[in-house]
Amino acid sequence: MTDEEAEALYEAARSCSGRGAIVEIGSWTGKSTICLALGSRAGAGASVYAIDPHADYRFGDFKDNIVRAGVQDLVTPVSSLSQPYADEFHQPVELLWIDGAHEYDLVVEDFEKWTPKVLEGGIVALHDTSWTEGPRRVANERILRSRHFKDARFVVGSTTMARKVAENSGADRVKNLYVLALKETFASGSALLKKRRGLLPAPLERLGRRLVGWLQ
């Protein structure tokens, strides 16, 4: 997760009104969880449901990190796969962060099971949408080419996020397609640079990252 992505999650959580919960699919050792919880604390204080199998040593690291960040009062760890847990979760969701299984069919299932729980005006964000086939396809097909999202944004390095609406406008769809083109251009350029790592000076790389933000 890049600094830009961490900041975007914080700001998205801070913007939540408290009408619904914040749901995270895939917690690992808690970096994104902490970003969401700190943002929530700076805003309306919505609860963060951190859904992950929370298996082996990682759960210990997760709990330690959450306590160290002082956000354990806002975070509810859920030891489960995200797909079956969706059937048990009946609260409205204001921010949905999907970063679980990356196989296309499983990302689609997460999207289809959880997105209907997101309130109109709520935010859906997907990680790894630049280079990983499953999240990339779902972001392109279900968000950026959809009639039900607006205010799309690509966050360097691989997050796509947008606001859920009943129906977007023609201008919204044009903006979404622009973000799709920007994301795909970034992914292609990054793949090329990875093959030639070291030839791009660090200041120029930072400038490129800022440029993606400015272009939106």
Image (cartoon, rainbow, N blue to C red):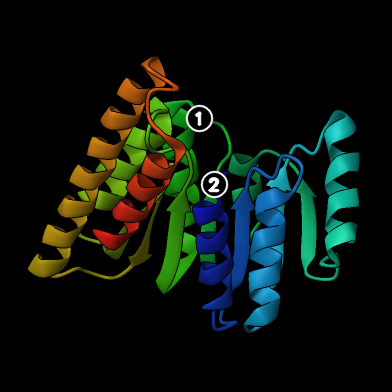
Residue shown at the point (35%, 24%) measured from the top left: 193
Between label 1 and label 2, give the one nearer the viewer.
2
Residue 112 in the image, given as x and y percentages of width and height: 42, 47
CA neighbours of label 1 inside 10 A, class few (<14), some (14 to 19), many (20+): some
Say if 57 sits above or below 123 in the image: above
Residue shown at the point (19%, 68%) measured from the top left: 168
- Residue in front for this viewpoint, 89 or 130: 130
> Looking at numbered disc 1 in the image, what kind of residue is underneath it?
His
User: In this view of the protein, can residue 48 be seen by the observer?
Assistant: yes
Circles 1 and 2: CB atoms closer than 8 Å: no
As helix, strand or loop, the secondary structure at mark 1 comes to loop
**Going by the image, does 61 lie left or right of 98?**
right
Residue 170 in the image, given as x and y percentages of width and height: 8, 66
Residue shown at the point (41%, 36%) measured from the top left: 135
Residue annotated with mark 2: 2
Q: Which mark is residue 102?
A: 1
